Image (tube, rainbow, N blue to C red):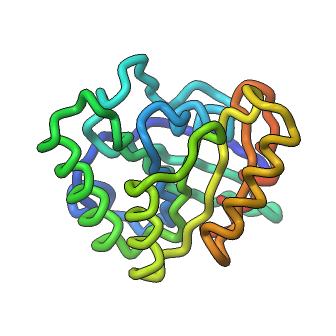
């Protein structure tokens, strides 16, 4: 499996304003500052995703067209990078808007094949995370968890957190990942593209 190209398409707020073509889509969701954009850049091996030093600054769902080769065939997928949630300094109205955005976009988008829940390995789950997980489970959405920034902790810490999350998210798969060192990149990329 090989990434051939990746490019930014547009920022959207709902699926009917996005692409008209039938392209498998992978949604990346998570809190502010967990490294979603850095993860996408690492996965496609180029700086295509827009990053911001200000948590909560992104308000649109950024779409990226990924072309890759698998089994000698050229294929396409859309990576959708959602705004981060849970940043305390963002107004409550904006946080509620995020919830409506993710619910409306994912529920109304039949092209989404998997949701990637991006999670900072150093955090402990709280009520916002529990609500998100329950929402995934209630709607029977296929999702996987990726524990990011593992380079900031020991391998033992990350491995233990992975075991805990496997119990927390039940049957969903859990990956460890570092955009800085490339840990977990190959396995995660294969998992994501297989979902498409």
Vertical order, 33 against 104 (above or below): above
User: Can residue 23 be seen?
Assistant: yes
Q: Where is residue 103 in the image (x, y as percent from the top left)?
A: 28, 65
User: Can residue 44 be seen?
Assistant: no
Q: Where is residue 23 in the image (x, y as percent from the top left)?
A: 47, 64
Q: Residue at x 56, y 67 (%)?
A: 143
Q: Where is residue 49 in the image (x, y as percent from the top left)?
A: 49, 31
The answer to which of 170 and 18 lies nearer the viewer is: 170
Q: Say which quarter of the image contains residue 182.
A: top right
Q: Residue at x 53, y 36 (%)?
A: 34
User: Which of the image's four quarters has the C terminus?
Assistant: bottom right
Q: Say which quarter of the image contains residue 105.
A: bottom left
Residue at far left of view: 93
Vertical order, 116 against 6 (above or below): below
The answer to which of 2 and 30 lies nearer the viewer is: 30
Vertical order, 45 against 105 (above or below): above
The answer to which of 184 and 25 lies nearer the viewer is: 184
Vertical order, 57 against 167 (above or below): above
Q: Say which quarter of the image contains residue 10.
A: top left
**Would you say 171 lies left or right of 103 here?**
right
User: Which of the image's four quarters has the N terminus?
Assistant: bottom right
Residue at far right of view: 156
Q: Position of residue 90 (x, y in %)?
A: 23, 32
Q: Which residue is drawn at 66% across and 46% down?
A: 147
Q: Which residue is drawn at 47% across and 78% down?
A: 137
């Amino acid at each position: 499996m090989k990434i051939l190209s990746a490019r930014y398409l547009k920022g959207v707020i709902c699926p009917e304003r996005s692409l008209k073509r039938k392209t498998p889509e992978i949604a990346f969701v998570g809190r502010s500052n967990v490294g979603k954009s850095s993860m996408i850049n690492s996965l496609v091996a180029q700086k295509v995703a827009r990053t911001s030093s200000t948590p909560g600054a992104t308000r649109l769902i950024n779409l990226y067209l990924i072309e890759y080769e698998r089994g000698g065939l050229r294929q396409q997928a859309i990576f959708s990078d959602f705004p981060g949630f849970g940043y305390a300094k963002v107004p409550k109205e904006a946080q509620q808007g995020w919830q409506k955005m993710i619910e409306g976009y994912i529920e109304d988008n039949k092209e989404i094949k998997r949701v990637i829940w991006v999670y900072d390995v150093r955090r402990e789950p709280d009520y916002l995370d529990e609500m998100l997980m329950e929402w995934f489970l209630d709607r029977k959405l296929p999702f996987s968890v990726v524990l990011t920034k593992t380079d900031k902790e020991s391998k033992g810490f990350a491995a233990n957190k992975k075991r805990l999350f496997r119990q927390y998210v039940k049957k969903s798969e859990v990956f460890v990942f570092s955009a800085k060192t490339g840990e977990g990149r190959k396995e995660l990329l294969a998992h994501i593209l297989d979902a498409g």
